[in-house]
Amino acid sequence: MPYSNKEILNALRNVKHPETAQDIVSMGMVDDIWIEGNKAGLTLSFKKPTDPFMNSMQKVCIQALEQHLGKDLDFTGNIKIKKPEMKNNGGQQDAQTLKDVKNIIAIASGKGGVGKSTVASNLAISLAKTGAKVGLIDADIYGPSIPKMFNVEGQRPLVRKVGDVDMITPIENYGVKVVSIGFFINPEDALVWRGAMATSALKQLIHQAEWGELDYLIFDLPPGTSDIHLTLVQETSVTGAIIVSTPQDVALADAIKGIKMFTGKHINVPVMGLIENMSWFTPEELPDNKYYIFGKDGCKNLAEKEDIPLLGQIPIVQSIREGGDYGTPAALNEGTMVADAFKELAASVIKVTEERNTNLDPTKRVEIKTK
């Protein structure tokens, strides 16, 4: 069946650039379409020489073409990349973006549903309340929730040119500078990205955000162990990791995997401690009552076994869930049991960070060597 250039363009209108959310045809990125028998090709013209989505966009275009035109036309190896020349040595900006960040802390969990993003948000706010300068990267690329928790959902960061690089100004609320992929997508859209696309997005959040001076840059990582975690330790010198878990045996089994990933010889990032979330249920009207729904002292026992600190135990309280849903994290409510728990957690994190920096050498970036 013969195809036309118009049909190819219509198929590619379904491909959106992750940064702008515009389709690549409307952006004028599709050039030099050709068809010869069952072979076809085109050129993708990118607007900036450092666009992190170049390689992944090639793959997405082939997927869209096959989905809408079938496999009669073979584009394999024939989608070329065209990019403008680098000027003003803009690529050196990447190496400088984190130079004024004192501590990079990864908040991780072995499994989903343990409240990692809730803990990361409240910890960031509690650290900021001590007078520290704090940034937070929502590195859960597939399920960004930080914009909602910080009541900045739907906002778009300012972007300015530095050489040939588009630099992002983090959105600030509650004393914390925040960057998330959620600022650049429709909240109702499902992100169906291959690993290369997700890691490219994370690199952009790291290196194209203007963080300035920070005492702590916190990464809210996706659950499990993935390309995102590997990209983080390759792109930054992580001061240390903190693992969040519930006291439940199933969650603890996955938390151990997270600990082993960071402390393994190829990664070698210090695990500074465990945070036990949902430690017990306490009705706010009965603050002295504790109901151990998920078991008792699971993280405490694991911390002792692995010889790492238990940094805090956070109870199940309705206000924590409401704070996340309504964009007013519970740590903001001074004098409450929950705010006090996160205040103590922040103090513990500050302490273990100082001890880590006193006793250990700075973490080196991971270099992946291929044979």
Image (cartoon, rainbow, N blue to C red):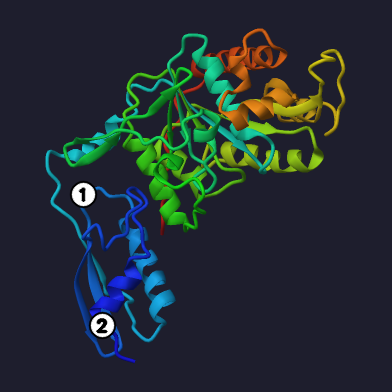
**Relative to the observer, which residue lies in front, 189 or 116?**
189
Residue 159 image-quadrant placement: top left
Question: Which callout, 1 or 2, points at the residue further toward the start of the chain?
Answer: 2
Q: Is residue 292 left or right of residue 172?
A: right
Residue 350 in the image: x percent, y percent? 55, 14
In this rendering, does residue 271 appear at all? Answer: no
Residue 370 in the image: x percent, y percent? 41, 56
Q: Is residue 359 left or right of residue 306?
A: left
Circle 1 SS class: loop
Q: CA distance from mark 1 to mark 2?
A: 29 Å
Residue 90 in the image: x percent, y percent? 19, 39
Q: Nearer the viewer, mark 1 or mark 2?
A: 2
Circle 2 SS class: loop
**Amino acid on which disc 1 is placed:** Lys
Which residue is painted at 50% across and 58% down in the image? 192
Image quarter in which the C terminus is found: bottom left
Q: Which residue is mark 2?
A: 4
Which residue is painted at 68% across and 41% down in the image? 113
Q: Which mark is residue 208?
A: none
Q: Which residue is mark 1?
A: 48
